[in-house]
Image (tube, helix red, strand yellow):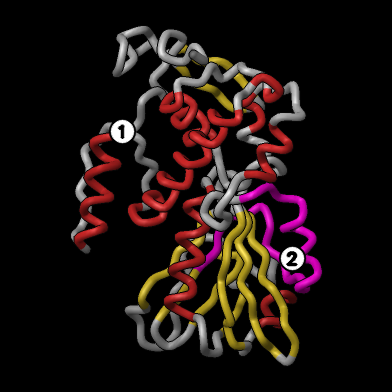
Amino acid sequence: MPEGHTLHRIARDLDAAFAGAPARFSSPQGRFADGAALLDGGEVVEARAHGKHLFVEVDSHETRILHVHLGLIGTFTIDADPYAGERPVVGMVRARIENDAHVADLRGPMTCAVITPEDEAAVHAKLGPDPLRDVTGDRAWERVTRSKKSIAALLMDQAVLAGVGNVYRCEVLFRAGVDPMTPGTRLRRETWDEIWADLRRLLPLGVATSRIVTLPEQVEQIETALAKGEEVYLTERDSFVYKRTGEPCLVCGTPVSATDVAGRTLYWCATCQTGR
């Protein structure tokens, strides 16, 4: 499932392509035809993300919101339009947004619906803070410290913390040296603040590069390149423990462990992540 940085990147690209002008909405697949008709011809005001939810605000006599959740297999591609005249449709396109310069195709989403601003506010209210939107993780900490669930499970709970998926969960816990089975009630506040600060550092790099990178040398490379306005070139390996079951830990050499937590495979190092 795409993690939060992917939705924020899509929102950024939709804004760049469509915000501030009318756009044409359609549903080549047909399943979203009624919703597309409500949005068609309206001005795209803004695209924004909260966690794994995307909202595209459209002013069409009244404010309507295109609400998208990609789920496990959804994609939203935004391209400069190379075609003159009718654009070809590739695959099962649930919703299409287009103007004279760009076309955006949504395929396979879990959610694709037209909602009201009040409906959007209700979605936000159910979500925890998003490191790409919120300065502090205080609201998330309040929920973490009251829960006996493991920190590994809590990081995947979108009502606690929005936008973090399995890759970031595994990697930030490793980077903080946290035992993933530590109950929320036993996690120290300074440890939580370290996790939150790390997410605030790493997620924007994911938006910028469209990759999840957590190795220090790569993080520093990207930060330096972005500061200079240069392009980023990365090596293949970009994780400490994610999907490295049985391989030696990059720090201590202990075989990486794996188990199921909150419906996804958790990867961790039993030596480096002792909680000390």
Amino acid on which the number 1 mark rests in the picture? Leu
**Tag 1 secondary structure:** loop
Task: Tell me the residue at 69%/88% (across/down).
Answer: 60
Give the left or right position of residue 15, taking residue 134 as reference. Answer: left
Rendered-image quadrant of the N terminus: top right
Q: Neighbour class for label 2 at 10 Å: few (<14), some, many (≥20)?
A: some
**Tag 2 secondary structure:** helix
Q: Is residue 68 above or below residue 182?
A: below
Quadrant hosting residue 93: bottom right
Q: Residue furthest front?
A: 190
Q: Nearer the viewer, residue 99 or 185?
A: 185
Query: Which range is magenta?
Result: 105-129
Q: Nearer the viewer, residue 186 or 102?
A: 186
Q: Earlier in the sequence, mark 1 or mark 2?
A: 2
Task: Tell me the residue at 66%/52% (across/down).
Answer: 110
Amino acid on which the number 2 mark rests in the picture? Glu
Q: Is residue 251 above or below residue 190?
A: above
Task: Provide residue 231's location: percent of width, then percent of height.
Answer: 20, 58
Task: Provide residue 56's location: percent of width, then percent of height.
Answer: 61, 72
> Residue beneath label 2, please?
120
